[in-house]
Image (cartoon, rainbow, N blue to C red):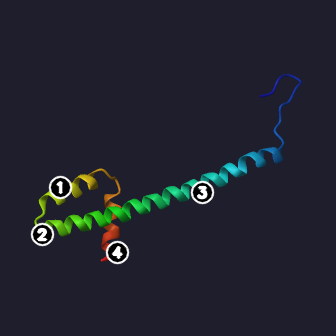
Amino acid sequence: MSYLHQEDWVHIDDYHKEVDPLKDKIKELQTVIDDMKYDEAYVLSWIMGLRNNARNRKEWETVAHCDHIINLHSAVAQAQAHQMRSE
């Protein structure tokens, strides 16, 4: 903020000293989020496999539990794609 006859400038080196570590932290956190999304889809694909095996053995209580867990997640499409790749 500047006042009349007074300037409040941020020196470019001070700016970079403050902002660059924050940009690095953002990249690091984005990597963590991406890894967690992959892990969610991977685990969900295993649960889908368990559900399919339980369905083949007619273990309906296990199928219901697996369905409940699967419905809690939004990564179902990614998990199905992961399951197709692993078969």
**Pointers 3 and 2 in contact (CB under 8 A)?**
no
Residue under pointer 4:
85
Mark 3 and mark 2: Cα distance apart in space: 44 Å
Which amino acid type corresponds to the residue marked 4 in the rendered image? Arg
Which amino acid type corresponds to the residue marked 1 in the rendered image? Ala
Residue under pointer 2:
57
Residue depth check, mark 3 versus mark 2: number of the one nearer the observer: 2
SS assignment at label 4: helix
Tell me what residue is drawn at x 63 percent, y 52 percent: 25
Circle on res. 28: 3
Mark 1 and mark 3: Cα distance apart in space: 38 Å
| Residue 78 appears left or right of 36 | left
Tell me what residue is drawn at x 31 percent, y 70 percent: 83
| Residue 65 appears left or right of 81 | left
Residue depth check, mark 4 versus mark 3: number of the one nearer the observer: 3
SS assignment at label 2: loop
> Of all residues shown, which one is farthest toward the bottom?
87
Q: Is residue 15 above or below residue 52?
A: above
